[in-house]
Image: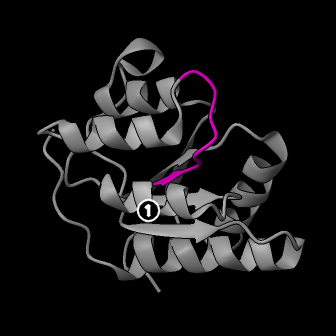
Amino acid sequence: MPNEPKDILLVEDDPCDAELMLEALGKHDLARRVELARDGEEALDFLNRRGRFAGRPGGAPVVVILDLKLPKVNGLEVLAEIRADDRLRRQLVVILSSSREKRDVAEAYRLGANAFVVKPLDFGAFSRAVERLALFWAATNEAPPVDE
């Protein structure tokens, strides 16, 4: 179990999936705070502390859980922008997507994803996958420092 819960940025536009993920993360106190961005533009605003997130406290989330199929800016574009930014490039990013397309998986890893997890269709399996993902990336793994 984690010594100190950390912040997670969840980037998910599907309200049902977002609710299931928030429920799974809250079930075992796997994060101190989970910030929800509903599109890629909001995710980048959060990470860069601009727009409605301009006044948010400093500090980076321990992990970004990123869907691929997002409005405004898609997940691969968000990942590419994170990796191109000197301040953010060490940010842990885990893709959680319904896509099983080999080209999506390959492109995500080419752009620097730390992991790619396919969303299970079954509710119980989905919940367990999110719990395991958070347990490893937010509680067990030692994240690299991210510049502010």
Residue stretch in magenta: 64-72
- Name the residue rendered at 88%, 74% in the picture: 122
Q: Position of residue 1 (x, y in %)?
A: 47, 86
Residue 6 appears in which quarter of the rendering? bottom left
Q: Is residue 60 left or right of residue 99?
A: left
Residue 4 appears in which quarter of the rendering? bottom left
Q: Residues within 10 Å of mark 1 (few under 14, many from 20)?
A: few
Q: Position of residue 26 (x, y in %)?
A: 67, 63
The answer to whether any part of residue 92 appears in the image is: no
* Viewer-side residue, 47 vs 77: 77
The answer to whether any part of residue 142 appears in the image is: yes
- Scheme of image coloration: one colour
- Name the residue rendered at 42%, 13% in the picture: 51
- Residue farthest to the top, as pictured: 51
Q: Is residue 147 left or right of residue 143?
A: left
- Name the residue rendered at 64%, 65% in the picture: 25
69 drawn magenta: yes
**Element class at badge 1:** helix
Dominant SS of magenta comes to: loop
Residue 55 appears in which quarter of the rendering? top left
Q: Circle 1 is placed at which residue position?
A: 106
Quadrant where the C terminus sits is top left
Q: Callout 1, which amino acid?
A: Ala
13 drawn magenta: no
Q: Position of residue 145 (x, y in %)?
A: 16, 58
